[in-house]
Image (cartoon, grey):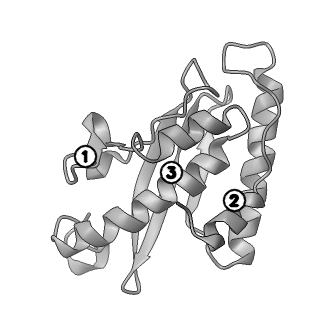
Amino acid sequence: MADEATRAAVSQIPVLKTHAGPRDPRWAERLKEEYLSLIRFVEQNKAADNDWFRLQSNPEGTRWTGTCWFVHELLRFEFGLEFDIPVTYPDTAPELAIPELDGKTAKMYRGGRICLTDHFAPLWARNAPRFGLAHLMALGLGPWLAVEVPELVQKGLVQHRDSGTTS
């Protein structure tokens, strides 16, 4: 399970109250909660000198894009990130995609969607609808990057942008 530092960090992320997906009339209310939770998580990360992603959404809050990065051996590896909010959200977690890593790891599906089924999906299911996008980043993407990026670098599948070849 999660270590104490992870538990402490996640406990500071506000849980969401509105059980509404993108087709629900209360989606605007849920989206406001999502933004507030994400803002709190980003502030918490910056205060801990652990800033590692940027996100923005379309006006409807159904398509999200941004960047995420992981520092390995004092080098910052940055990747484009995208996901759509599923119609069954918040009962179903979004599928995060890092298209530029497509096909470079077994822990990824077609289109660069990262595999979160074994560890994160059951956690999301137990905590829906209280979990939101900040939880997805903290408990889904963050641990995935921490495991996969060092391995991809070690195998030579991802190289730092300043090394002459891009990731």
Distance between the alpha carbons at the discs numbered 2 and 1: 28 Å
* Position of residue 83 in the picture relative to residue 25 (left or right): left
> Residue 77, relative to residue 64: is it above or below?
below
First-in-chain label (3 vs 2): 2
**Vertical position of residue 136 compared to residue 45: above or below:** above
Q: Give, as a three-letter code, the residue at label 1.
A: Asp
Task: From the viewer's perspective, tell me whether residue 13 is left or right of residue 138.
Answer: right
Q: Earlier in the sequence, mark 2 or mark 1?
A: 2
Q: Residues within 10 Å of mark 1 (few under 14, many from 20)?
A: some
The residue at the far bottom in this view is 74
Q: CA distance from mark 3 to mark 2?
A: 12 Å
Residue 1 position in % (x across, y down): 52, 60
| The quarter of the displayed image where residue 9 is located | bottom right
| Residue 10 - label | 2
Quadrant (top left, top right, bottom left, bottom right) of the C terminus: bottom left
Give the CA distance from mark 1 to mark 3: 17 Å
Q: Label 3 sits on what residue type?
A: Gly
Residue appearing at x 75%, y 59% in the figure: 11
Drawn side of residue 113 relative to residue 21, left or right:
left
- The residue furthest front is 1
Task: Give the mark toward the camera: 1 or 3.
Answer: 3
Determine crowd level at label 3: few under 14, some 14-19, many 20+ residues with C-alpha closer than 10 A: many
Residue at image location 74% in from the left, 40% down from the top? 34
Which residue position holds label 3? 140
Q: What's the residue type where badge 2 is placed?
A: Val
Q: Which structural element holds mark 3?
A: helix
Mark 2 vs mark 1, foreground winner is: 2
Q: Secondary structure at mark 1?
A: loop
Q: Which mark is residue 102?
A: 1
Residue at the (54%, 34%) spot, across then down = 93
Name the N-terminal-most of marks 1 and 3: 1
Residue 150 at x, y percent in the picture: 31, 72
